[in-house]
Image: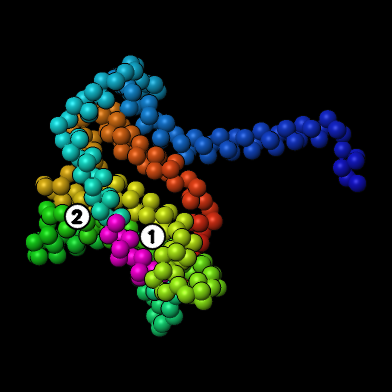
Amino acid sequence: MYMSYLNPKRWVHMMGRKKFGEFLVLAAFMLFFYGPLLHMFMLAFANKYEMPGVLPQEFGFQWWRYVLAQPTLVSSIVLSFTIALITTALSLLICIPAAYVLARYEFPGRKLVMFSFLLGNAFPKIGIYASMGIIFYRIGLMGTLPGVLIVHLLGGMMLMIWMPTNAFKSVPRQQEEAARDIGAGPIRTFFYVTLPMAWPGIAVASMFTFIGSLGENQGTLLVGLPNYRTMPVEMYGVILDYPATAGAVFALILLIPNVLLLFLMRKYVGPETLSKGFKMG
């Protein structure tokens, strides 16, 4: 009834103001969220950029040529991908059986075990890495590949336990029982029924583990130097010794494989998969 007494022009004006306000909020959010990324893209193609200028004074590929000419660039890229692949493979071998047990068997302290994997992410990473460095120094793992791999494995342990555990829990037991009824053994049932149905959650966990390993820097810097210099470690040196434009180029090179991987895995990445993966079941 109240709507009928409103002047139509006034109603249109009010709706226009509301839509404009919503647009301003959205624009502010987009600027806050994507502004640093857009600024990085701009810096990566800036030959000359001096404050207080908002835009670079000269665009070009000067710093791309510099970064790509670095003799350690190719080796750092290869090393980063090698470590990320090994880390993901080892995480699957270690965590998938553990996740299956946590999903399928009830035992005292089960939730406490799952919660313990969260504790490693509740503290500043640099403090944990410093403690690990002291232990690694005593047992001879500083500057070694096993030491670097352990750092990367611990970094992705929570994802590789929580998400596959909840993925296995979402598989209906009736499907497994039906396969067993027609003569499939437990191993055949796991690989042909359970694993394919749980694969979306496992794939997302593996993807984030790979991306996390590819971008891990603090632990690798502390434990891996001087023998293992990955892309993020090399980027530290470039940012400290050269203008921000060179660091933006290196950051963009590091970003490209992550974007490609997210694009390839887009059918698995979604709110439903992620929300199921982080349930404390």
Range covered by the magenta-colored residues: 89-100
Which residue is label 2 attached to? 148
- Quarter of the image holding residue 76? top left
Which residue is label 1 attached to? 159
Outermost residue, bottom direction? 108
Tag 1: Cα neighbours inside 10 Å, few (<14), some, or many (≥20)?
Answer: many
Where does the image place residue 56, in percent across and percent down from the top left?
35, 20
What secondary structure is found at the residue carrying circle 1?
helix
Where does the image place residue 57, in percent across and percent down from the top left?
34, 16
Q: Residue at x 34, y 48 (%)?
A: 211
**Image coloring type:** rainbow
Q: Residue at x 88, y 45 (%)?
A: 2
Q: CA distance from mark 2 to mark 1?
A: 19 Å
Amino acid type, label 1: Leu
What secondary structure is found at the residue carrying circle 2?
helix
Residue 95 is covered by the magenta coloring: yes
Q: Residue at x 11, y 47 (%)?
A: 227
Outermost residue, top direction? 58
